[in-house]
Amino acid sequence: MSLITYLTKIHFSVGIIDEALPHELANLNISNVLIVTDRGLVEAGLVERICDVIPARISVSIYDGTPENPTESACSDAAHIFQQNQCDGIIALGGGSCIDLAKAMAVLATHDKPLSQYAAVEGGVTRIKDILPPLIAIPTTAGTGSEVGRGAIIVFDDGRKLGLISPYLIPSVAICDPALTLGLPAGLTAGTGMDALTHCVETYIATAYNPPADGIALDGLGRAAGNILAAVENGKNIEARREMMAAAMNGALAFQKGLGGVHAISHALGGLAGYRLHHGTLNAILLPHILAFNAPAVEPRYGALKHAMGLADNADLPNEIINLTKRIGLPTKLSEMGIDDAAITKAAPLAERDHTNATNPRKATATDYAEIMRAAL
């Protein structure tokens, strides 16, 4: 069986795209679809691959302007194409940026502007209504898990990187075909993989009570820790690719429970003008420092994390994360990504206000976050 139903309907199998996509387009009564993707996937031939699978009776429009971090202006551009071409459904093809942009543009296409009023920190959760067009999410990376998540992270016109959160943002269906990730370069495999691993770790130690999420997170952590190096070293290893896609899916299925300080800082830094920062790589650098900060409040739960990762009971968890990050070729210091003290000063208060800070195990202020970032510099 390749069909899973948890938060949403998920097709998960190597090569499942040819069977699942036509079926779901018909099931959702989509006759005029907008594909939301990026130029890289167009050039790689993946958009053409998807178009070949779409039945001829369905009209297809394409938005391929998704930036590395989805922006409010890009969401507006995509929403304009959706409305102008009278589309009645969306296919989000790509990594988390493409899928998040598709979710946010769906809000813009069906709700009143501005988009910022729907951000979680602006009280926007209840403002998003059940009037969104059907969305089919097809991930081509194994990291964010946005294909099964209820959130979208957007860089707004005012420079803030904020989350939209609503159960109505969960895609109507996810089609997870690990074969679509075989061409992902090693660096992106590493960065997105550490995003998935971080989701599982942060979810497990988040303050909310959700035993099913804890179990899913630990399972995902084991898959990520056990396969990320193999996926980085040999991108054609389909078993490792499958397990990393499963880890990403698990992380997002679980993080409805909440995340924590790693994401609070990553969101804050990721929205700063003048810096090009990969979210998963930021997470990899920050995770050991947040684990050290949170230890006084939640260290008893670290034993289960070590066990899931195949580590000894007496292992130093932050150091093990640093060692893994080095082995897969990612930087271990913020300065290696071009982050300086000016960025830290700007990001610290934004991190305190980020929605993920609410479920961090240990109360963290802007001062705490500034100290954490300086320690990671």
Image (spheres, rainbow, N blue to C red):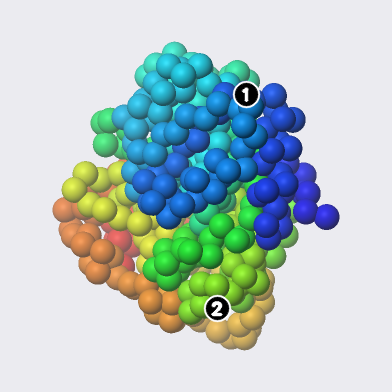
Residue 342 horizontal/vertical position (percent): 16, 53
Residue 13 horizontal/vertical position (percent): 71, 57
Kindly identify which numbered label has been placed on residue 257: none
In which quadrant will I find the N terminus? bottom right
- Left or right of residue 318: residue 351: left
| SS type, badge 2 | helix
Does residue 313 appear in the picture of this structure? yes
Q: Residue at x 31, y 29 (%)?
A: 73
Residue 38 horizontal/vertical position (percent): 40, 44
Q: Residue at x 62, y 43 (%)?
A: 53
Residue 45 horizontal/vertical position (percent): 46, 52
State if disc 1 and disc 2 touch (CB < 8 Å): no
Q: Which residue is identified by label 1? A: 31
Q: Which residue is identified by label 2? A: 230
Rounded to the nearest angstrom, the CA distance separating label 2 from label 1 is: 41 Å
In front: mark 2 or mark 1? 1
Taking depth in this image into account, of 203 and 104 the one nearest to the observer is 104
- Disc 1 residue type (three-letter): Ser
| SS type, badge 1 | loop
Taking depth in this image into account, of 73 and 196 the one nearest to the observer is 73
Does residue 104 appear in the picture of this structure? no
Which of marks 1 and 2 precedes in the sequence?
A: 1
Taking depth in this image into account, of 32 and 251 the one nearest to the observer is 32
- Disc 2 residue type (three-letter): Ala
Q: Residue at x 49, y 45 (%)?
A: 47
Q: Is residue 147 above or below residue 193?
A: above
